[in-house]
Amino acid sequence: MSMLRAICALRVGVTTPKPYLLPSIFSSSFNIHTLSHTTFSRTFRFHSPSIPLSSFLPLIPPKAAASYGTGSGGAEGGRPRELLVQHLLVKEDDQKLLLDLQQKISSGEDLSDLAVEHSVCPSKEEGGMLGWIKKGQMVPEFEEAAFSAPLNKVVKCKTKFGWHLLQVLSEREESILQDIQPHELHGKIQDPNFLEEAQLIDVREPEEVAKASLQGFTVLPLRQFGSWGPEITTKFDPEKDIFVMCHHGMRSLQVAKWLLSQGFRKVYNVSGGIHAYAVQVDPSIPTY
């Protein structure tokens, strides 16, 4: 699916009900089916349809009273930001329904309730929730309307998919995903305070960890994602830095991207994995 099709295909954490994928609207998106190590004997999926989608949603503020506007205004300047957005979509030629919905919102009805009943976007199953978005991820018309909209004010915009009524529920400084080089990580590990406070995840399998490991890392095997994925925001603080490592840095990168989608603010992928750490920093660690 191309980026231009993304608005009408969005749900929180997925593009379509099956299979469960991250939104292709994200320029850094990835197919969860790729989250298998090259030696896996089967295709790995992040979670099965039996796990409730709500377990994977970022924390969402309570419903806010909405008013209806035209999309002019909004914050200007400052650092890059992300917006928590919900919307509903109606067909371009369904002007009567559009006007009716605008009147209902002006009368105090909730956008998410109206999305469930009337939206033609798959996100209706989540009350129109699109999750956190940043600039460069949405089709231009939708992005312009969202990033100029005042908080909680429902605004209207038109894209190739039809008419959208959208509402920005919250905003925050843009999240960060970046590589950390082995020598940088080594320097941090020498600080006892870092090991006490850091959130360190090793997504390799137990048999790999038995061959080589680093102090302080919590082992969360990727093959066991179904057991730890739904509880990730209770086990780790999304507001604190989190570091992810695997063998060569590929599996950890995919998990790092997923952590961003779950609301983690600063995520670091150990570049080259434990193999690079052993070769570049600590030759006492076995390579395999």
Image (tube, rainbow, N blue to C red):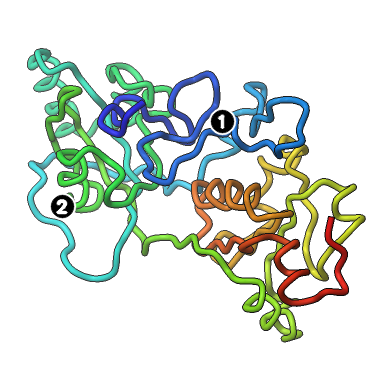
Q: Residues within 10 Å of mark 2 (few under 14, many from 20)?
A: some
Instruction: Give the total of numbered labels.
Output: 2
Q: Position of residue 105 (x, y in %)?
A: 19, 31
What number is the disc on residue 148?
2
**SS for dot 2:** loop
In the picture of the structure, the residue carrying the numbered disc 1 is 53
Q: Amino acid at mark 2?
A: Ser
Quarter of the image where one finds residue 283: bottom right
Answer left or right for 134 relative to 219: left
Quarter of the image where one finds residue 174: bottom left
29 or 272: nearer the eye? 272
- Which residue is pictured at 90% across the width and 57% down the height? 211
Quarter of the image where one finds residue 98: top left
- Which residue is pictured at 28% across the width and 20% down the height? 119
275 or 218: nearer the eye? 275
Answer left or right for 155 relative to 178: left
Q: Position of residue 249 (x, y in %)?
A: 64, 55
256 or 118: nearer the eye? 256
**Nearer-N-terminus badge (1/2):** 1
